[in-house]
Image: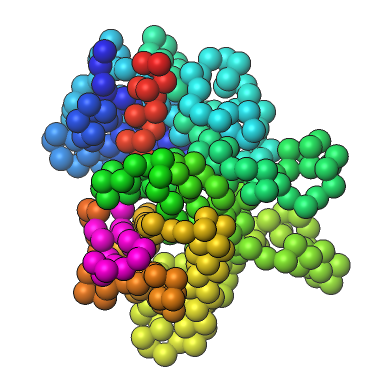
């Protein structure tokens, strides 16, 4: 059986892709087709010939998939559908329907579309990518891997909201979480790196990027996670509020006359770090703090405060913590955030060595002292490899 998997991450105006050899964990090529549906599209491909970029109208996802195939054919490696094990699709929301990867057929594709009310910005775009990819590769198995499925292992006390039961059941309101593919990959990789049994390790994963989430993983099973019904809840993010008193919504409806769409835009796109200090890129925030910007300094303190609160909560819920793993764009590259997010937690056995922590980390790195009770690491995430692995495992089962 071939171990080559094409991983597709389809957005509303983009298709990110990567060809992976699961047998060697090697990325053979990757790229993105973006600005789909706009006057002029853009595509970038990185393969054996290096980087290639083109500008061309991309009216829809089917056209985007055709451009991707042209880039593979012209700049390698050429994809032979007969030697492709699967096409793996990232899907944001699987609801309570999908607790693991699923082989895509018309029924599964429709179920994913039916879950769109829980992820209106993501699932419709994921389905568009499926339709285009299934047309391009009609004889290749297609597998959906869900951001929410790892969190399906949570117990009822973690995923249940204290909401009227009938309303919650009727409208599927519960904690689903997100970034689950990353949390699974990072927690499992942490156990492998430490030479520990995954089924015996308690890990807190801090996935810190423009979108950010935390998870508590007990013995290889997600016990709790910070994102909720949608990816809005939890940690402070680049432009999202994270946790906020829901009565703020009622207040703004009454006193400001804001509509549902206006509130959605405010909470998801104009809040978080951007809303507090006008900047969503942490590099800009650090520069502003160094220049004496008090709004930026306060925003960073809010950011750290929220992370510490989740670490303390998960420490109490797990009973003991063996490891804390930072990952994603900020977690892997921002040593200031890593240091300050855990500062003051020394009584819990959580310590960061400033020298080990310094700089960006492109490979797994322990940043805690050797004698620390809790091992703190940076573990670069690889969601595409995890998707490819799950696709191969499903087909081989």
Question: Is residue 43 shown in magenta?
Answer: no
Q: How is the image coloured?
A: rainbow
Q: What predominant SS class does the magenta segment belong to?
A: loop
Task: Please name the residue shown 31% across and 53% down the image.
Answer: 379
Question: Is residue 369 shown in magenta?
Answer: yes
Q: Tell me, yes or no, if residue 314 can be seen here.
A: no
Which quadrant is home to the C terminus? top left
Q: Tell me, yes or no, if residue 322 can be seen here.
A: yes
| Residue 20 image point, x, y percent | 27, 30
Furthest residue toward bottom: 292
Task: Please name the residue shown 48% across and 18% down the image.
Answer: 103
* Magenta region: 365-380
| Residue 90 image point, x, y percent | 46, 34
Instruction: Please identify the quarter of the rendering in which residue 82 is found.
Output: top left
| Left or right relative to 351: residue 229 | right
| Left or right relative to 148: residue 118 | right
| Residue 123 image point, x, y percent | 57, 35
Task: Please name the residue shown 79% across and 42% down the image.
Answer: 168
Task: Please name the residue shown 50% across and 79% down the image.
Answer: 301
Residue closer to the observer: 237 or 17: 237
Q: Relative to 176, does residue 65 appear above or below in the rendering?
A: above
Q: Relative to 59, does residue 259 appear above or below in the rendering?
A: below
Residue closer to the observer: 121 or 93: 93
Which quadrant is home to the N terminus? top left
Query: How many numbered discs?
Result: 0
| Left or right relative to 350: residue 227 | right
Q: Relative to 350, does residue 331 appear above or below in the rendering?
A: above
| Residue 76 image point, x, y percent | 18, 27
Q: Relative to 396, does residue 17 appear above or below in the rendering?
A: below
């Amino acid at each position: 059986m071939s171990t080559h998997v094409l991983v597709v991450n389809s957005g509303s105006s983009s298709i990110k892709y990567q060809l992976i050899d699961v047998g060697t964990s090697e990325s053979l090529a990757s790229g993105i087709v973006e600005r789909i549906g706009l006057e002029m599209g853009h595509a970038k491909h990185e393969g054996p010939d290096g980087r290639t970029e083109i500008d061309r109208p991309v009216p829809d996802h089917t056209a985007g998939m055709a451009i991707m195939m042209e880039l593979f054919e012209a700049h390698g490696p050429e994809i032979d559908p007969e030697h492709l094990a699967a096409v793996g699709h990232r899907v944001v929301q699987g609801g309570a329907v999908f607790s693991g990867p699923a082989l895509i057929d018309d029924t599964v594709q429709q179920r994913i579309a039916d879950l769109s009310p829980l992820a209106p910005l993501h699932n419709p775009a994921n389905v568009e990518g499926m339709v285009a990819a299934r047309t391009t590769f009609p004889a290749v198995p297609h597998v959906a891997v869900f951001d929410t499925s790892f969190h399906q292992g949570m117990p009822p006390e973690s995923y249940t909201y204290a909401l009227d039961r009938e309303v919650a059941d009727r409208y599927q309101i519960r904690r689903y979480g997100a970034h689950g593919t990353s949390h699974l990959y990072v927690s499992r990789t942490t156990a492998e790196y430490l030479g520990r049994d995954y089924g015996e390790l308690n890990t807190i994963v801090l996935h810190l990027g423009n979108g950010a989430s935390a998870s508590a993983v007990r013995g290889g099973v997600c016990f709790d996670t910070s994102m909720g019904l949608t990816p809005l809840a939890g940690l402070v993010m680049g432009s999202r509020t994270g946790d906020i008193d829901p009565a703020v919504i009622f207040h703004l409806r009454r006193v400001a006359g804001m509509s549902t769409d206006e509130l959605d835009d405010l909470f998801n796109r104009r809040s978080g770090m951007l809303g507090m200090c006008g900047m969503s890129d942490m590099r800009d925030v650090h520069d502003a703090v160094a220049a004496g910007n008090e709004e930026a300094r306060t925003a960073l303190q809010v950011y750290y405060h929220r992370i510490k609160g989740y670490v303390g909560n998960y420490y109490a819920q797990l009973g003991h913590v063996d490891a804390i793993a930072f990952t994603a764009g900020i977690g892997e590259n921002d040593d200031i955030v890593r240091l300050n997010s855990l500062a003051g937690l020394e009584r819990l056995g959580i310590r960061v060595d400033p020298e080990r922590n310094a700089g960006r980390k492109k490979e797994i790195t322990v940043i805690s002292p050797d004698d620390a009770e809790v091992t703190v690491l940076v573990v670069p995430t690889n969601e595409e490899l995890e998707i490819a692995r799950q696709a191969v495992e499903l087909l081989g089962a």
